[in-house]
Amino acid sequence: MSMDLAQLEQAFAEMQAKQDLHELNVRYANGVDRRDRALLETLWWPDSVIDFGLFVGSGEQFAEIISAPNPAVEITYHFASNELFEVDGDRATGRSYVLGMSVVLAEDGSKSDQLVGGRYLDKYERRGGVWKFTHRLFVVDWMNSQPDNAVWDAGIGAAAQRGRAGLDDVSYTFFKS
């Protein structure tokens, strides 16, 4: 089966759109985990909506809230996979599985590790050649919460760079040199 030039161009455009949508999802996870408001604000169209359960509002409002200092959440870590995108011109839908881990601080000073498994159901639009979210729904499928038992003073915990929530994470300086 051979493809003519028009079919090749169409196939390439669809692959490029899917790569752009994948990178949008990666930037979202990075922005949330690093609490990077400036990055998060670039991912949403002004008329966007995100329904995160605890929060329903615009992407801009979400970026403001999720990036604000939160003493109850020490750090978060997201991993999205099993992405499936369906592209129809300048609109697309997507679904991806997500694992999210948070270290949560209780009022008594104790910490717990919360592991959540769920899915993102997304709608996207390309405007002016740029893909952004128009609607994101977070669906929780399962979760596990247990007392924190991290060891930070021995082994890999003591030896490796430690990730941080915020713009002082090593990833913001590592690529500049």
Image: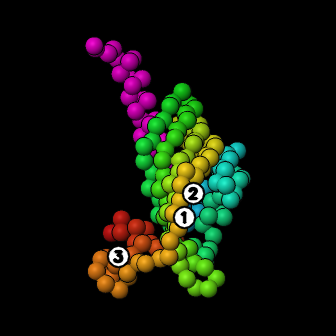
Place of residue 165 in the rendered image (x, y in percent of width and height, measured from the top left): 50, 71
Residue position for label 2: 40
Label 2, residues with CA under 10 Å away: few <14, some 14-19, many ≥20 = many
166 or 135, nearer to the observer: 135
Residue position for label 3: 161
| Labels 3 and 2: the sequence-earlier one | 2
| Labels 3 and 1: the sequence-earlier one | 1
Residue 11, numbered circle: none
C-alpha span from label 3 to label 1: 19 Å
- Residue range corresponding to the magenta coloring: 1-25
Is 83 rendered above or below residue 78? above
Labels 3 and 2 touching (C-beta < 8 A): no
Mark 2: secondary structure: helix
Quadrant the C terminus occupies: bottom left
Q: Look at the image and tell me whether residue 28 can be seen.
A: no
Name the side, left or right, on which 87 lies relative to 47: left
Quadrant the N terminus occupies: top left
- In front: label 3 or label 1: 3
Label 3, residues with CA under 10 Å away: few <14, some 14-19, many ≥20 = few
C-alpha span from label 3 to label 2: 24 Å
Residue position for label 1: 36
